[in-house]
Image (cartoon, rainbow, N blue to C red):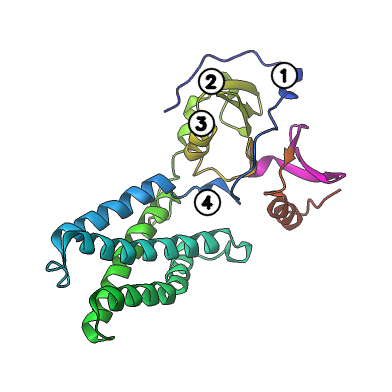
């Protein structure tokens, strides 16, 4: 876990020495959407469910050998988990679904994942236990799928502040790390070795923590990851500019940050939608 480090004096020249040599991986349209779940947590949750089903042996699976039960439930639950994660990632990052309510996007994700999950579980069942499609098998598949889907979507809805009703604004823990004199009007984050450089409308500070942890704490703040090393607040996007084969964003405070190839198509679409097309 990261922790605050005393504010380090910031010089404008230092900001130009950002580390741009890291490899770009993944694609994140907005922090609040695509960091709504964590892979390690999902893997742990999936493993725990598999363990419970293996030990208890529901749906007449207890007579199977322990290792067979473990493999059976790992393939069944794991395939459903993987298909639903893929479907959720698709609906959460698709720009045409931005205005859909979370309930609608969740329902669409479950619908998209239903058929491949059903076929995968059916195949595993026939392969390991024999028999054909019947009412019991359909019930078993439906139960497992609803268990996986409801658990995962509940986690996503909670982190996106979509818990229903007129809930209070979701907290943004990272803002509490900022020195009081810098306020809470966050403009951008940049990775600096083991530090995160946080810039607000009133100045800049360095905080000793991992960049990924900082993004996790910003899950409820509207913003865009534009590079493996850079994140900007949505309100701070002033425009995008092309310089040869490179793309940069201009922020409302006058600074420019690079956009990696991974994030460039998404940032261009966002800028165009906001009327801030490439110069």
What are the residue bounds of the magenta stretch? 234-257
Secondary structure under badge 1?
helix
Rendering quarter of residue 23? top right
Query: Considering only order in the chain, which callout, 3 or 4, is on the residue closer to the N terminus?
Result: 4
Calculate the distance from the C-alpha at mark 4 to the C-alpha at mark 1: 30 Å
On screen, residue 117 above or below 205: below
Mark 1 nearby-residue class (10 Å; few <14, some 14–19, many ≥20): few
In the image: residue 64, left or right of residue 98? left
Mark 1 / mark 2, whichever is N-terminal? 1
- Helix, strand or loop at mark 4: helix
Q: Tell how many labels.
A: 4
Q: CA distance from mark 4 to mark 3?
A: 20 Å
Residue at image location 51% in from the left, 31% down from the top: 175
Q: Which residue is mark 1?
A: 14
x and y, in percent, of residue 54 in the image: 20, 59
Mark-to-mark CA distance, 1 and 2: 20 Å
Q: CA distance from mark 1 to mark 3?
A: 23 Å
**Residues at badges 4 and 3 in contact (C-beta under 8 Å)?**
no
Neighbour class for label 4 at 10 Å: few (<14), some, many (≥20)?
A: many
Label 2 or label 4, whichever lies nearer to me, is 4
- Residue 175's disc is 3
Q: Quadrant of residue 68?
A: bottom left
Tag nearer the camera, 1 or 3: 1
Residue at which label 4 appears: 34
Give how far apart the Cα atoms at labels 2 and 4 are.
28 Å
- Mark 2 falls on what kind of element? loop
Magenta stretch contains residue 267: no
In percent of width and height, residue 46 lies at: 32, 55
Q: Is residue 164 visible?
A: no
Tell me the crowding category of disc 2: few under 14, some 14 to 19, or many 20 or more residues within 10 angstroms, Cα based. some
């Amino acid at each position: 876990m990261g922790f605050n480090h005393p504010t380090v004096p910031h010089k404008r020249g230092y900001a130009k020495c950002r580390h741009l040599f890291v490899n770009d991986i993944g694609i994140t349209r907005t922090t609040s959407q695509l960091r709504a779940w964590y892979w390690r947590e999902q893997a742990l949750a999936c493993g725990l469910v598999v363990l419970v089903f293996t030990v208890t042996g529901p749906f007449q699976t207890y007579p199977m050998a322990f290792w067979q039960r473990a493999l059976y439930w790992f393939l069944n639950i794991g395939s459903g988990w993987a298909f639903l994660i893929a479907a959720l990632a698709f609906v959460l990052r698709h720009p045409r679904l931005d205005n859909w309510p979370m309930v609608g996007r969740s329902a669409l994700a479950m619908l998209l994942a239903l058929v491949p999950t059903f076929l995968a579980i059916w195949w595993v069942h026939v392969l390991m236990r024999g028999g054909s499609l019947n009412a019991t098998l359909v019930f078993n598949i439906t139960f497992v799928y609803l268990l996986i889907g409801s658990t995962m979507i509940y986690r996503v809805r909670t982190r996106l502040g979509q818990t229903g009703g007129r809930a209070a604004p979701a907290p943004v823990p990272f803002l509490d790390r900022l020195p009081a004199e810098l306020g809470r009007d966050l403009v951008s984050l940049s990775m600096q070795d083991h530090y995160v450089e946080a810039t607000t409308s009133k100045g800049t500070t360095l905080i000793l923590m991992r960049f990924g942890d900082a993004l996790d704490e910003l899950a409820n703040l509207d913003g865009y990851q534009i590079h493996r090393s850079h994140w900007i607040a949505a309100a701070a996007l002033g425009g995008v500019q092309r310089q040869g084969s490179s793309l940069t964003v201009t922020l409302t405070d006058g600074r420019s940050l690079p956009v990696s190839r991974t994030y460039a198509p998404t940032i261009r679409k966002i800028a165009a939608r906001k009327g801030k097309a490439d110069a």
